[in-house]
Amino acid sequence: MTTSIPRHRDLTLDLARVVCVLVVVFVHLLLVGVGRNPDGSPFIVNPVSGERWFAPATWIAEIMPMFFVVGGFAAKVGWESAQRRGESASTFVRTRLRRLALPALPLFIVLTAALTTVRLLGIDPDLADAIAVPVGSVLWFLAAYALAQALAPWMIRWHERNPWLALVVLFAGAFFVDVVRLVVGIQGLGLGRIPADGYGIGDELFGLPNVAFVWLFAQQIGFCLRDGWFSRVRWWNLVMIVAGFACLGLLVILGEYSASMLTNQWPPTLPLAVLAVIQAALLTLLHRPLTAIMETRPAQANVFFLGSRLMSVYLWHVPAIVLLTGVQLLWLPMPDPGTGAWWLSRPIFVVAVLLVVWAISTVTKRWESPQPILSPRWPSDAVTVIAVALFVFQSLAISSYGLDLPLAVLGLVCTAIAVVFAGGSSNVRAPDVPSSTAEAMPPSPR
């Protein structure tokens, strides 16, 4: 390895981010099963959602809160470094926005071109939706993470002034939004899910404020992790894990929450805030064995290699799944979804997806490591706000209504404007080690 690792960098956080993305890839491979009818025509099913074990398994497999916990840790480290350099909050936000918007730009270019081609060729719209909607379903992360990173300087100040108040207000806000969605949207107005066709109104729209409340709460947990809250008394982490899962059980039994944490992911609901605490405690509890793993050269090499392409893996893994499924439909045998042969093919598909994404990342990697912003083109704070708002808006629109050609164009235009508005002149090359991961962590008690 030629990369220089900072002396105080906590490599377990790099490992956590990489493992989280790999889990996301594997779960998405489980949710889509493609087979052939007796007449040879293909069909698409979800072979695992109806299984009795699936909902309990999501209490472990739903790892998106960990992204925001680690992201909060990293944001606090980055903000502390920015303050030492005399960097403004606006520059801090622009830098983090570019790290999300630039890798997304080539994806939106490809999606817009592909959906335009589908429209011109007159391909069955239902078939196009069956492909496009899953591709767009992962883009909610761009809105949520961009919003959390953009608000990080102010959230950090709130945390430093009154951390408990910040946690309580955000947690209560998430609960209030869930109540409004249930009482007003579902029970009062009788709304169901957003219609599959068009841009109607559904109960999900009442839950959109939780994109802020839930994920900002998880970010606050990351700030607490950075401050050493979880490592002061080690056995408390086990207590928090047990109590957290008990709390999840009560929310599912007594509340109106789904037992599947994947269902609770969009729009985000209160159980994901509880999962953020559980996962932060689990990460701290496993800190020593994970550190031992990351002291080995092979682990460091693999984690840093995947870490340098992490956004590419996340953004492009669903298109890669679609591509491989198409290849399988045309030329390869297809085991029936849910059978033993199908399960044995899942690890092979994970490797195949990663190889396809790696091939894509050889082209897209230049967008994944943007250079630091030394002199913004438009230094106004209002421009920064507009850039963040446009990028968040298009991701929320796609996540709410599903990806189609008009929304792909919207995503492309808004992302391009965000990149331009957040850009500036630079003459320093970005580091090879992913800079969005935290550099330090307080030592665990011995």
Image (spheres, rainbow, N blue to C red):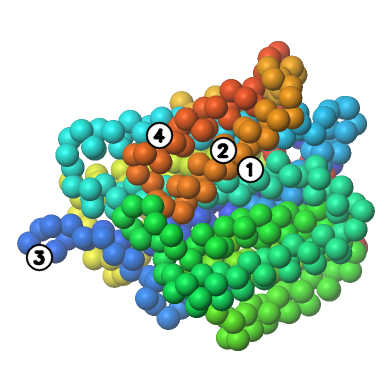
Which mark is first along the chain, 1 or 4?
Answer: 1
Amino acid, disc 4:
Val
At a point 83% along the width and 28% down the height, the residue shown is 87
Q: Secondary structure at mark 3?
A: loop
* Foreground disc of the pair 4, 1: 4
Q: Is residue 281 left or right of residue 358?
A: right
Residue 427 lies, with reference to residue 409, above or below; the image says above
At a point 56% along the width and 76% down the height, the residue shown is 183
Amino acid, disc 2:
Phe
| Real-space Cα separation, disc 2 to disc 3, in angstroms | 45 Å
Which mark is first along the chain, 3 or 2?
Answer: 3
| Real-space Cα separation, disc 3 to disc 1, in angstroms | 47 Å
Q: Secondary structure at mark 2?
A: helix
Q: Is residue 138 left or right of residue 41?
A: right
Q: Secondary structure at mark 4?
A: helix
Residue 391: give its label. 2
Which mark is first along the chain, 4 or 3?
Answer: 3
Residue extending farthest bottom: 254
Give 355 or 378, whichever is nearer the viewer.
Answer: 378
